[in-house]
Amino acid sequence: GAVVSQHPSRVICKSGTSVKIECRSLDFQATTMFWYRQFPKQSLMLMATSNEGSKATYEQGVEKDKFLINHASLTLSTLTVTSAHPEDSSFYICSATPAGPNQPQHFGDGTRLSIL
Amino acid sequence: AQKVTQAQTEISVVEKEDVTLDCVYETRDTTYYLFWYKQPPSGELVFLIRRNSFDEQNEISGRYSWNFQKSTSSFNFTITASQVVDSAVYFCALSYFGNEKLTFGTGTRLTIIP
């Protein structure tokens, strides 16, 4: 079945580092992917909609210059957290939906980002 | 605006008991989708069900069942004969028709006590 792969699964790095997270649809093409963030013991909040070949659409309150999204192909979207700080530590998870009717959204396994 | 409310933040039941997780939603759209996801301690989201607003039939899948009532804007989830492996955080979510951007509830942490 459809699978979304997310890499890396866990990142620990120093404050000020930029971190890139990849989201791949393994056996289907996705013109749209979504990026969510989940703080500990909280719900998932949509950060942005990644659109293949065009600019991402960011939710209110999400800094587009800090969270860079690139969707250069139909199977890959990347989220780069630039100059990460401890408050950016969170669980980041992407999702994508195969084309066609009645297709459920598939989520990656998430990336746990810890900024020291 | 869309909103999903899961009033139960944490529930604990003894194994083999039945448990119902509540979900109440708000939307101005007449067409929408409702979802339930399971998030085990490992963090990944496991898809459980998607239901569109035109289909109010209850659904049963093994030990899981869902009760969708548009009159009360609720989409409740029942686990029958609970098992320890059911312990997880369960999220109810809502999306617009044709737009899979999801609005999640705050989740219910379910603990099954052996």
Image: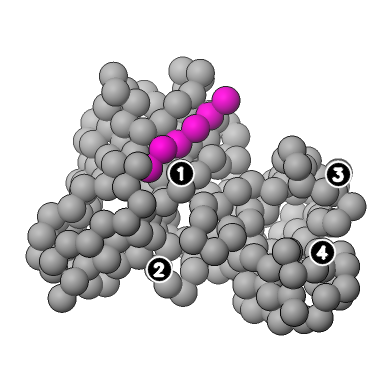
Taking the image as shown, residue B14 lies to the left or right of residue A27, namely left
Same subunit: marks 1 and 2? yes
Q: Earlier in the sequence, mark 1 or mark 2?
A: 2
Q: Is residue A32 above or below residue B55?
A: below
Cα distance, mark 4 to mark 1?
26 Å
Q: Nearer the viewer, residue B39 or B49?
A: B39
Taking the image as shown, residue B59 lies to the left or right of residue B37, namely left
**Residue designated by label 4:** A80
- Picture residue at 62% right of the left edge, 72% below the top: A112
**Residue designated by label 3:** A55
Element type at marker 3?
loop
- Picture residue at 35% right of the left edge, 65% below the top: B88
Q: Which residues are magenta?
A: B1-6
Residue B52 in the image: state x and y as whole percent: 40, 31
Subunit that carries the residue with mark 3? A
Q: Nearer the viewer, residue A86 or A13?
A: A86
Residue A100 visible at all: no
**Residue designated by label 1:** B105
Cα distance, mark 1 to mark 2?
16 Å
